[in-house]
């Protein structure tokens, strides 16, 4: 069994990003600038956004964190997004999900300028992804693909089971794994809460991506010897032996499953770190594309 080590791979990718930012600035480009919107004070969202902002600092990006109370209205939030769309200083906009129940996440995401949609959640970004056109890929599936690429895992022809059908992970992951790319070219089954024969499907899988949000849901009796297991879950469970009284576990029962696998991601230290890499790569790309579009327009005017 080999660990797919998010600490190692993310450190490598972050070095590449830092170098790319330095080169970009040497060519007269400005620092990429990410704006993150956080509504309310969900502790998990606070932690994720805090980590994203910290990474901006580490990689030489600018960041702006906008915090709003949980009772902000949908119209007010959309007005903030529009303000960021129109702010030429901002390259990428991220609205941390989930939003409070009275706000439609779809309406807020639809308001983001697709050129700044570094989460890859806007319908235009999703549509381009489906068609295989260049676009911002959702950060978690993008990060998983980067990890498979780093370990040079050839997934062509593999049976892949993605458990979960969320817009953030399950649906885009299913798509990316089935595209004619490397990694990719897998035969993918998207399983969900109504799937009847999950255990059978998993036992036939060469690669399992668990993104259901249930602690230790994937157990050893569901995993074929030699399978690759990617654990997207980040669940906090009580643990009296810890000072905090809790600890993080994934959607996979790591201790039971790991000995069976050819490769497995740990939690923490696996996919979570790769998500940040995906987001940062998207933000740098957004900054470059926006600047090049402005430069191109200026060139066209001068001709
Ligand atoms: N909530 C959980 N994952 C994500 C993510 O990748 N982006 C945003 N914006 N919200 C999330």
Image (cartoon, rainbow, N blue to C red):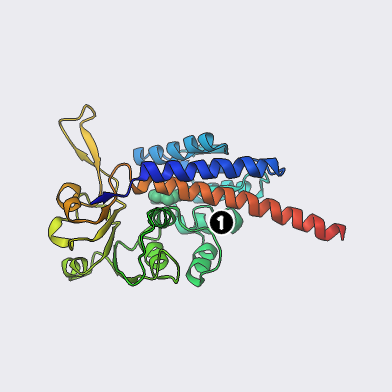
Res 41 seen here: no
Q: Is residue 90 above or below residue 201?
A: above
Q: For label 1, count other residues whose C-alpha is less than 10 Å away and answer few (under 14), some (14-19) or many (20+).
A: some
Q: Nearer the viewer, residue 292 or 18?
A: 18
Q: Nearer the viewer, residue 183 or 231?
A: 183
Residue 58, position as x, y percentages in the image: 51, 34
Res 182 seen here: yes
> Which quadrant holds the C terminus?
bottom right
Q: Which residue is mark 1?
A: 111
At a point 20% along the width and 31% down the height, the residue shown is 245
Residue 28, position as x, y percentages in the image: 72, 43
Choose top left, top right, bottom left or bottom right for residue 236: top left
Q: Is residue 186 above or below residue 85?
A: below
At a point 17% along the width and 53% down the height, the residue shown is 257
Choose top left, top right, bottom left or bottom right for residue 142: bottom left
At a point 38% along the width and 57% down the height, the residue shown is 148
Residue at the far right: name it.
303
Residue at the far left: name it.
221
Horizontal side of residue 114 vs 204, given as left or right: right
Considering the numbered disc 1 on the image, is that residue within a helix, a strand or a loop? Answer: loop
Q: Nearer the viewer, residue 181 or 53?
A: 181
Residue 178, position as x, y percentages in the image: 39, 70
Horizontal side of residue 218 vs 9, given as left or right: left
At a point 81% along the width and 57% down the height, the residue shown is 299
Q: Is residue 263 above or below residue 276?
A: below
Q: Nearer the viewer, residue 149 or 59?
A: 149
């Amino acid at each position: 069994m080999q660990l797919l080590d998010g600490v190692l791979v993310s450190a490598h990718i972050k070095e590449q990003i830092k170098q790319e930012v330095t080169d970009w600035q040497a060519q007269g480009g400005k620092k990429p600038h990410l704006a993150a919107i956080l509504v309310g004070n969900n502790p998990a969202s606070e932690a994720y956004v805090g980590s994203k902002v910290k990474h901006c600092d580490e990689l030489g990006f600018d960041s702006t964190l906008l915090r709003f109370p949980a009772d902000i209205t949908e119209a007010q939030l959309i007005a903030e997004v529009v303000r960021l769309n129109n702010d030429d200083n901002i390259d990428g906009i991220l609205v941390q999900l989930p939003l409070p129940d009275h706000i439609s996440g779809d309406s807020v995401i639809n308001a983001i300028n697709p050129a700044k949609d570094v989460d890859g959640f806007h319908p235009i970004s999703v549509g381009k992804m489906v068609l295989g056109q260049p676009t911002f890929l959702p950060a978690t599936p993008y990060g998983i693909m980067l990890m498979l690429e780093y370990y040079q895992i050839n997934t062509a022809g593999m049976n892949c089971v993605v458990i979960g059908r969320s817009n953030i992970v399950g649906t885009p992951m299913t798509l990316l794994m089935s595209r004619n790319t490397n990694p990719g070219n897998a035969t993918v089954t998207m399983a969900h809460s109504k799937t009847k024969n999950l255990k059978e499907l998993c036992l036939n899988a060469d690669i399992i991506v668990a993104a259901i949000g249930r602690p230790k849901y994937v157990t050893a009796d569901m995993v074929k010897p030699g399978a690759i297991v990617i654990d997207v879950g980040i669940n906090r469970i009580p643990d009296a032996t810890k000072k905090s009284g809790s600890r993080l576990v994934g959607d996979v029962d790591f201790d039971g499953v790991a000995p069976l696998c050819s490769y497995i991601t740990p939690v923490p230290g696996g996919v979570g770190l790769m998500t940040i890499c995906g987001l940062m790569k998207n933000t740098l790309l957004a900054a470059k594309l926006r600047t090049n579009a402005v430069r191109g327009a200026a060139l066209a005017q001068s001709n």
